Amino acid sequence: MEIKKFIEEFKGFTVQEFEHLTYAMIKPDAVVAKEEILQDIEHRGFKILFQQEYQFSKQLAENFYSEHAGKGFYDRLVAQMTAGPVVVLILEKQGEIPCYQVWRNELGATNPANAAEGTLRNVYTYKLFGGPEMYAQEKATNCFHGADSVASVIRESNLVLYDMLMSI
């Protein structure tokens, strides 16, 4: 879906509707497997409402991850997020459990070395890099992002979609 059209639809969502949505990203290190990952996401029961590759600027990455500023992994995370395009996703999943929470369960632990078998971080860390011991020793390199609350879904979606719109 084209960004301007999606933003018009997005502006009409109510807070209650955001319970069934989440902001997600395929990070630059996993974009090479984008098509397979998108199929996997749909197979896991998520509807992809919006998806687009987008290059984060340093400023956008710093703003997006501002809550981590000053932490030991922050600079690596910003560098990773600007190393290549991401795939921006707005996902939908109906149910009793908020969509962001279902998505984060599907992602697995932030550190792929601790991600349960079958979770996205576990599966794609092995497929792309031979396993967490070969690649994902740092939290900054975990292939995916998932909002951690409804407030984060709203904040992150607005931040990135606005940046995308302004870059047209």
Image (tube, helix red, strand yellow):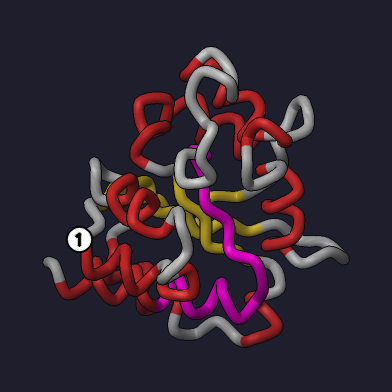
Left or right of 84? Residue 120 is right
Q: Furthest-left residue in view?
A: 168
Residue 83 forms part of the magenta stretch: no
| Image height of 128 relative to 111, above or below | above
Q: Residue at x 36, y 76 (%)?
A: 159
Residue 155 forms part of the magenta stretch: yes
Q: Nearer the viewer, residue 45 or 27?
A: 27
Q: Provide residue 156's location: percent of width, then percent of height.
A: 46, 72
Q: Secondary structure at mark 1?
A: loop
Q: Provide residue 111's location: percent of width, then percent of height.
A: 63, 41
Q: Residue at x 84, y 64 (%)?
A: 97
Q: Furthest-top residue in view?
A: 130
Q: Provide residue 65's location: percent of width, then percent of height.
A: 42, 67
The residue wearing badge 1 is 57
Q: Residue at x 70, y 83 (%)?
A: 16
Locate the N terminus by quadrant: bottom left
Q: Residue at x 55, y 30 (%)?
A: 39
Q: Which region shows up in magenta? A: 142-158
